[in-house]
Image: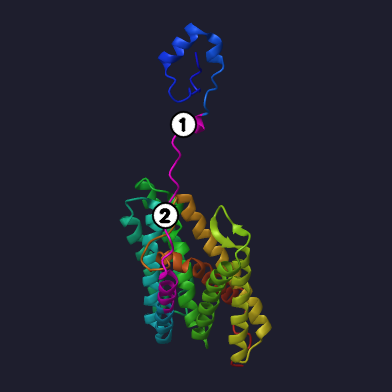
Amino acid sequence: MSGASEILPMGITADHEAELVAADPAQLAAIEPLPMEAVLPKPEPELQTPASPWEWPVRVLFGVLLAVLAITALSFGGFYFAGFVGLIAVTAGREWHRLVAGPSFGVETVLTGAIVLAALAVFALWPRDSGLWSLAILAAGAGLSAGVAHLRGKSELWNGIAPLYLGVPALSMVALDHYQPHGGWIVFEVFLITWAADSGALIFGKLIGGPKLAKKISPNKTWAGFIGGTLLPALIASAIVAVLGGDAEGAAIFGVVLALAGHAGDLFESWVKRSKGIKNSGGLIPGHGGMLDRIDSALFVATTAAIAIFVLGIDPLFGAFG
């Protein structure tokens, strides 16, 4: 008798096989069984959804719209800019907790939002003396968030870091805006470097392609995009500082450092999404995904800029206005 893995040729049934054995065993031995691949149905090819011709125009349109909103809020400064930054952080916080906390994330979202807004409000009210107090609020809030997550059976780590992951960059942006005497220009420089890093990576990656940067984390990112997204911010930073009368070479190095921080922020969020099996953090912004997808690099850039300026004492405008 044939083995379980052998398939007899078309028209040879088990009854026919028995008849052949009875008549002439040698005749059956001459019959070659068909391989499994020959009789199993072939899987249907995956249908690739064609890219919409409107994808790039929509992406550019909403990218420009967000940039205009950010610059407008920055031009008003003070509470207006702090409120804008707080709104962005709260929106991103909802997406973060939906990403890491599962279907029930309302409590974690509200808690993180309240902590971040409290830290920003304290700094906006008393900007000269409250920086450490605002950081203390975020640190205590991280511990509180981890405790609440534990009580609710959620991940203490992923939910607990949210006030720091979102709050420290938000506080950094507001603090940079208050940096005298040219805080607004510094934030504008940080904006341009961040946008240049994102745009350079996207454009160079699409036009050149080539080897992947981190295929297991983010399959679409390439080394060409990484290089383009590092050189373009350096050029932008050096150009704006040179126009303002500062040292273009120092600004270029500063641009490279912030661009590298931006790449790290982008890869970090990509790694978290991939570990959770999710492509985008949300669908709030057409062409971009969620708010967290749009600001992932800015989170690391803002924090790095704040450390460079407030801790290391680096002049981000490199003598401009001097």
- Highlighted range, magenta: 36-64
Amino acid type of disc 1? Val
Give coordinates of residue 174: x percent, y percent. Answer: 45, 77
> Where residue 279 sits in the image (x, y, percent)?
44, 56
What is the C-alpha distance between the residues marked 2 and 1? 51 Å
Residue 66, image x, y percentages: 41, 76
In the depicted view, which residue is nearer to us: 109 or 6?
Answer: 6
Residue most extreme to the top: 22
Which of marks 1 and 2 precedes in the sequence? 1
Colour setting? rainbow
Q: Is residue 277 visible?
A: yes
136 in relation to 233, above or below: above
Q: Helix, strand or loop at disc 2?
A: helix
Left-right relation of 259 to 81: right
Q: Is residue 235 magenta?
A: no
Q: Which mark is residue 39?
A: 1
| Residue 16 or residue 86, whichever sits in front | 16
Quarter of the rendering occupied by the C terminus: bottom right
Q: Residue furthest right?
A: 249
Residue 159's mark?
2
- Tell me which corner region of the image, top left, top right, bottom left or bottom right, holds residue 291: bottom left
The residue that appears at 63% across and 69% down in the rendered structure is: 227
The residue type indicated by label 2 comes to Asn
Q: Is residue 75 left or right of residue 204?
A: left
